[in-house]
Amino acid sequence: MTKESWIELRNTLFQISSRASLRRKKGAVRAMKYILSTNVGEHVPKSSILRHWNEYLLIHGPEQGFQPTLSLFVWVESAGITALFTAVVSRALKLFKQGKKPMAYSFYDAQEEAEPSCCVEAATSEEDECVDSGEVLSCEGSVEKSAKESEPIAVGTGEGNDDNSVRPPSLVERLPRLGGCSEDVISLLSFLRVLMPVDYLDEDGRMIGRSAGYGVWLYACLTAVDTPFDPDLDRLVHEFFRTCCLQLRVLGEAHNVRGDDRGAILKVFPSRKDDPPQSSQYNSLGDVRKEDVLALHTIIVVLAKLFRLNGNRLVPL
């Protein structure tokens, strides 16, 4: 391997990982050999049919505690990644809208939530494989091991998630309803519940599961999705972009932060690393941390750059 090709390989790997070992030639070569030796799991759809990716996301997605595997983005074709990206964005928006409904909602609202939409459908028994071990992308873009010992805790029936004949409980069904604050704050907390990792608790307050958050899936898809988008996906992504911007506005207004003071919004939130070990469910504005603000900023910046590649002009906010 020449010096030029090694540097190119290192720079490519750094786009999806921040591991220090990749700075060395030996570490980069070992990582590349590992990637080439992996195959996408049997449960991963082989087509670009959106319904199949919706089903995959319900069973093997963030709501069940799974993070996206690196092999998924190495071996799945471009059309499949676009379908996965569409499923991730549409599912995230649907959960966000369901989660911000008031605590007292009607029987008809519950029926509406139970009905499958064109973007999100109930899982079938076509896929019954668990997520294969390998390397996955973390929220910071690093590569981590995802062997069997780090599989998510089974939730819901207590029998695990390997029985795909029954749709597993959704994120909204596993978290307490939001209330006791303004509609804007409820909207913000609902969005952060979808975007960021949250814990599932039983009646005694013990953690019985965890959502990995749709943010890491969205960010992973953004590193691999092709442009230009079709009109429907373009409108969907713009809606998600506007939603992110609105949540930042709510955070700024809650702490009287204006846009003329660069970085001021980060100064008013403590870091999560300073918190004692505790469950995270975003039940109040006091649960928001600096990392959540940075996650919103990151998604907005990446989507803005993507719109430029897609030939869009930024929509008025």
Image (tube, helix red, strand yellow):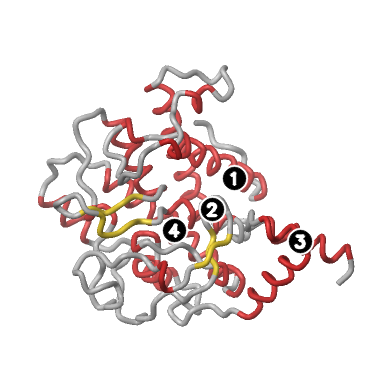
Residue that carries the numbered disc 3 in the rendered image: 24
The x, y position of residue 265, in whole percent, is 49, 25
Asked where in the image residue 149 lies, by quadrant, the reply is bottom left
Mark number displayed over residue 211: none
Residue that carries the numbered disc 2 in the rendered image: 219
Question: In front: mark 1 or mark 3?
Answer: 3
- Mark 1 or mark 2, earlier in chain: 2
- Mark 1 or mark 4, earlier in chain: 4
Q: Are marks 2 and 4 in contact (CB under 8 Å)?
A: no
Q: Residues within 10 Å of mark 3 (few under 14, many from 20)?
A: few
Residue that carries the numbered disc 4 in the rendered image: 88
Q: Label 1 sits on what residue type?
A: Val
Question: In front: mark 2 or mark 4?
Answer: 2
Q: Label 2 sits on what residue type?
A: Tyr
Q: Residues within 10 Å of mark 4 (few under 14, many from 20)?
A: many
Q: Is label 1 in a helix, a strand or a loop? A: helix
Q: Label 3 sits on what residue type?
A: Arg
Q: Are marks 1 and 2 in contact (CB under 8 Å)?
A: yes
Residue that carries the numbered disc 1 in the rendered image: 302
Q: CA distance from mark 1 to mark 2?
A: 8 Å
Q: CA distance from mark 1 to mark 4?
A: 16 Å
The x, y position of residue 232, in whole percent, is 48, 55
